[in-house]
Every structure is written in structure tokens, then in C-alpha cells.
Amino acid sequence: MSLHETRKIKLHQPENFQFDSIPDSHAWDNLHDHPTVEPVGPDTIPVIDLCDPKLIEKIGKACEGWGVFLISNHGIELKLLNQLCSQMHRLFALPADVKLKVAKADSFDGGYGGDPFSRFLPKYTWSESFTVLDSPLEHAKILWPNDFSSFCDVMEEYKTAMNRLGRRLMHAMLLSLGVSEEEINDTPFGDFSKIKTVYSLNSYPPCPEADRVLGLPPHSDTGFVTFVYDNGVSGLQILRREDDNDPKRWVTVPVVPNTFVVNVGDLMQVLTNGRFHNMVHRAIIGKTYHRMSAAYFFSPELDVKVSPLSKLIDPGVGPLYKTMTWPELQTKRSLSYGHALDAFKIDSN
Ligand SMILES: O=C(O)CCC(=O)C(=O)O
Ligand SMILES: [Fe+2]
């Protein structure tokens, strides 16, 4: 058993991305549980221009119908996004023994590690990630003792930009459901100053047998809303619910330059009393290109209590979820993979 298997994270030594053939430990056998389709026709994932005069209406429709959409014209400078990609590249190019100096001890920690889900599953993922809680400073000083500030400066700018964007999106989403600005300000996160900074930088190295390995297993994110920016390599897939014409299917998210993918998380489903649905997604691996992504989890401070907004509770039905904090939800997820929200459901009978 390696050092990391004894911890509460599951991470094979990163140099092991070099295999002559894929070992059984990394070969996932249920990757084709649902058909995979391209994002065309009825499976076209909406791209929403944030300066569109019909923004609120379009966002509401995308959240209710899809739970995922892309945003363009988001106001975040391309220069910053290019710097973010360069810093991710620099981070993951570090030797394995250096990255392991900042390894997480637990999946809720910040630092370097595997993904938080596969420790419940029998296989290893083909990915590595670096999670930042508030600030990467402490870890960056260990990774680059003589040059940590360029990484930290970019991450600080990214955090500020993402928090601003997160607030803007949350307002638009709630306004689309008829919640007024005043009512939004009355929520426990009020003006959204009670927002916790959490993001993951993810690396998915290429694999010659890409269709046997998996970057991230299917999951929904636990926060309000997640913003994903990647280095222009495709790999994110979302699980579209079955409808009248088609069964459940994996839809590949298209790469559209200078856009973010936005997906609805568990806490948004709670806040909207089920009007918006969380979105199950996974990351697959490419044969040739190394994909990297930054996933920003716009989520409440750890002590903030989240419950359905009274405006969105149907008086005849009542609230669908009990009050919860984000750590309570995450703890449930760490106990029952894929069913965290069930523990908070209010039985309507
Ligand atoms: O890399 C991606 O596209 C998705 C990342 C993700 O789902 C996550 O970090 O939770
Ligand atoms: Fe995710």
C-alpha cells in the first residue's frame, strides 16, 4: 500500500501516468453506461451572452431546461485567463515529489491530490488536482520557494474576478425565478459577502487508451454554481436526463473560445426548492492532448445556513429540503456518493 492509500484521499503516484498498458486498477468498465452524443440539434448546450438584453430570461430557461450553459462576454480579461492556464501548466509540470510535498491529508483540505470521489469507487482516476481554499500562498511557498508570487498574484486576480462573476450570475438566476433584488439581499448570504473561496485546478494527461480510463467520475458539485474554464481541450460531459424522445445520454460540452461553462450545483437546487436541478457531469480523457481546467465552486461560507427561499416554496407543497450548511452537505456526500441531497429531503407524505 502506498503512502497515499493510507490517507483519506486516493492518489496514485503521478509518475504512474506512464504505463505500458492500462492496469486493471485504472480501467473503468462502465464508461459506456449511456450513449455519448455531440452537442447538436436538441442537445445543443446554450451559449449565453452576458450582455444580451434578454439575459435573465435566457438564463432562467437554461437553468430549468439544462442545468448547464456556456457564458460569453463575461468581462474577464483573456490575458488573465491565459495566465491562469500558464500557471496550471507550470504547476502540473512540477516533479511528482515536489507536488507531493503539498499533498492533501483529507479530501476536504486544500492542496495537491486525486479527485474527491474515487475513494468511494473501486478504480483510480486519470487525473490530478490542486485545490485552493481561500489562498494558495502557504502551498505555493513550498512548491516554488524562490518564486511563489507569480502564481499567487494570478490566483488572487482570478479569485476576485470569479467572485464578482459568481455574484452576477447568482443574481441573474434568482431574478429569473421572480426573486427580487431586495429578497436576494435578505437571504443569509445577503450581498454575497459570505462567500467561501474554493477552486480546483485539474489536470487530465493524455492516454493512448483513453476510452478505458476516466478523468473524474460522474458527480454533481455541491456548491451553488460552478464555473469551468479549460485550456481549449474538450473532456467535460454532462448527463442529460431522459426525455420523450431520447434516453439518458452523455453530452460532450463543446470548446468555445473565451467562454466559461456554468453548472448548477446541489445548493442551488436547495435554494430554488428544486426549480433548478443540479447537473451530473464527468471528465473523460483524450488520446493526444493534455487537458487542464479550473473549476470555481461559488459556495457559501461554512457557517451559512441554506434552505429553500420562501418565495420559491409552493404553499401547497412546502419546502422540499431541510436547512443545511455546505460542510454538512459535503459530509453527507463523503458518506453516500451520489446521494448527498437525499439525506436532506423532506418527505411530502
Ligand atoms: O474539468 C472539468 O471540466 C470538470 C471539473 C469538475 O467537475 C470538478 O472539479 O468538480
Ligand atoms: Fe464537478
Image: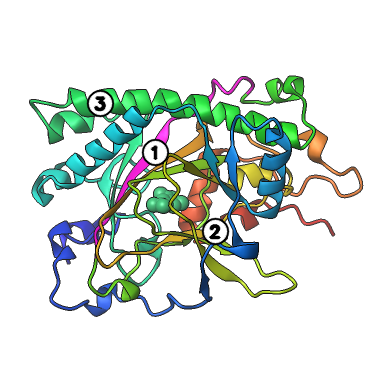
Q: Mark on residue 281? A: none
Q: Mark on residue 199? A: 1
- Mark 2: few/some/many CA within 10 Å (<14, 14-19, 20+): many
Residue under pointer 2: 280
- Mark 3: few/some/many CA within 10 Å (<14, 14-19, 20+): some
At numbered mark 1, what does the secondary structure look like: helix, strand or loop? strand
Q: Earlier in the sequence, mark 2 or mark 3?
A: 3
- In the rendered view, does 304 fall on the left or right side of 307? left
Q: CA distance from mark 2 to mark 3?
A: 31 Å
**Residue 347: x, y in percent?**
77, 57
- Inspect the image, locate mark 3, and give the three-letter code of the amino acid beneath it: Cys
The yes-or-no answer for disc 2 within 8 Å of ligand 2 is: no
Residue under pointer 3: 152
- Residue at the location (75% across, 72% down)? 244
Q: CA distance from mark 3 to mark 1?
A: 14 Å
- Inspect the image, locate mark 1, and give the three-letter code of the amino acid beneath it: Tyr
At numbered mark 3, what does the secondary structure look like: helix, strand or loop? helix
- Residue at the location (62% across, 32% down)? 170
Q: Residue furthest right?
A: 316
**Residue 349: x, y in percent?**
85, 59
- Residue at the location (43% across, 75% down)? 31
The yes-or-no answer for disc 3 within 8 Å of ligand 1 is: no
Residue 197 belongs to the span the image colors magenta: yes
- Inspect the image, locate mark 2, and give the three-letter code of the amino acid beneath it: Val
Residue 77 belongs to the span the image colors magenta: no
At numbered mark 2, what does the secondary structure look like: helix, strand or loop? loop
Q: Earlier in the sequence, mark 2 or mark 1?
A: 1
- In the rendered view, does 195 fall on the left or right side of 201? right
**Residue 340: x, y in percent?**
56, 55
- Residue at the location (12% across, 32% down)? 144
Magenta region:
190-206
User: Where 152 sits versus 337, above or below?
Assistant: above
